[in-house]
Structures are given as structure tokens and as C-alpha cells.
Amino acid sequence: MDMDVAGFVELQQLIEQLGKVPQKVATKAAGAGARIDLSATKSDAPVYDGWLKASLKMVGERASKPGKKVYEITFDRAYNSKLVKTSKAGKRSYYPVSQEFGWKYPHGGYHVGLQYMKNTAEENKGKVEQKIIDVAKDGIDKVLSQAR
């Protein structure tokens, strides 16, 4: 039994066109979401001398799969000379990590970290997800409208 579905050829073409879209759309959408997180993290970062805030940046990982993009909020290595602290005993510590996770005192005891990066990411999860969805939807709609 032969069946001819109206618009089936057009649908196949749209699906093929959509298969070419994801990397470009994924990169743009993930970047938009990560910028929200970066901005919020910078505003929540503790300020001692300003280097911690200045060193925060967004780094994209190399795409391992087509249609996937991940950004990480991390610290710029160019600021390491300002962020690595050396004690009188010669022990080195990385200031951003101690601010996030805490540190041990030399005489015993523990200072709890601020966990500003973790807290900011949790607080902005909904905004970031919505931004990613909105940007991805706009990108896909744009590609599909050009394909028609």
C-alpha cells in the first residue's frame, strides 16, 4: 500500500537541516547561560585585593560530541602570581581554592570556606537553564525558517 503524506519531503529536508545546527546553537546557548553564571559569581566573590574577581573567566571545553558545549567558570592562570600565597614556613596555597573550600590553621582547627561559586551556581540554576533554552530555541527556529 503506497501512502503519500503531504509535506513529508519538506519534513525530511527540515530534519536534515536541523542535523547541521546543533554545534553552533549549542555553543551560543551554553555561552549565554555561562555568562549569567560568570557575572553572578564575580559579584558574589569575596574581595580582599580584587585579584580573585579579576581572575574569574569562562572557559569552553573542546567539543567531544557534536551538539554539545560545556563552559567552566574558573581562574585565569595569568593571575597565579597574585593568587598563590606562600606562608612563612614556605607552604604554598592557592587563594581561590581556600576561599571556596576553606583551610586548616597551622595550630589546628579549620576555617570553613565561603563556597561562593557553588552557592551562586545553585541560586542561578533556573535563570541559566531558561537562558540556554531560550537561546537554543531561537537558534533552531532561525535555522528552520531559513530552510523553508
Image (spheres, helix red, strand yellow):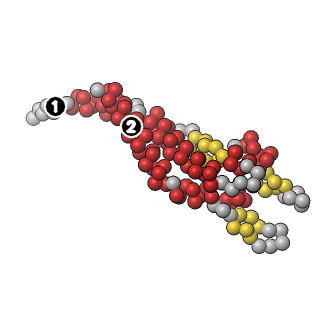
Q: Is residue 6 left or right of residue 10?
A: left
Along the line of sight, the residue nearer the viewer: 31 or 49: 49
Identify the secondary structure beneath mark 2: helix
Q: Residue at x 50, y 45 (%)?
A: 33
What residue did someone put label 2 on? 138
Residue 30 seen in render: yes
Along the line of sight, the residue nearer the viewer: 129 or 6: 129
What residue did someone put label 1 on? 6
Tag in front: 2 or 1: 2
Image vertical order of residue 131 relative to residue 15, above or below: below
Mark 2 crowd level (few <14, some 14–19, many ≥20, 10 Å Cα) = some
Q: Position of residue 71 (x, y in %)?
A: 56, 44
Q: Position of residue 72 (x, y in %)?
A: 59, 47
Q: Amino acid at mark 2?
A: Asp
Q: Amino acid at mark 1?
A: Ala
Identify the secondary structure beneath mark 1: loop
Q: Residue at x 86, y 58 (%)?
A: 87
- Quadrant where the image shows the N terminus: top left
Q: Position of residue 41 (x, y in %)?
A: 60, 51
Mark 1 crowd level (few <14, some 14–19, many ≥20, 10 Å Cα) = few
Q: Position of residue 86 (x, y in %)?
A: 84, 55
Residue 23 seen in render: no
User: How many marks are shown on the rendered structure?
Assistant: 2
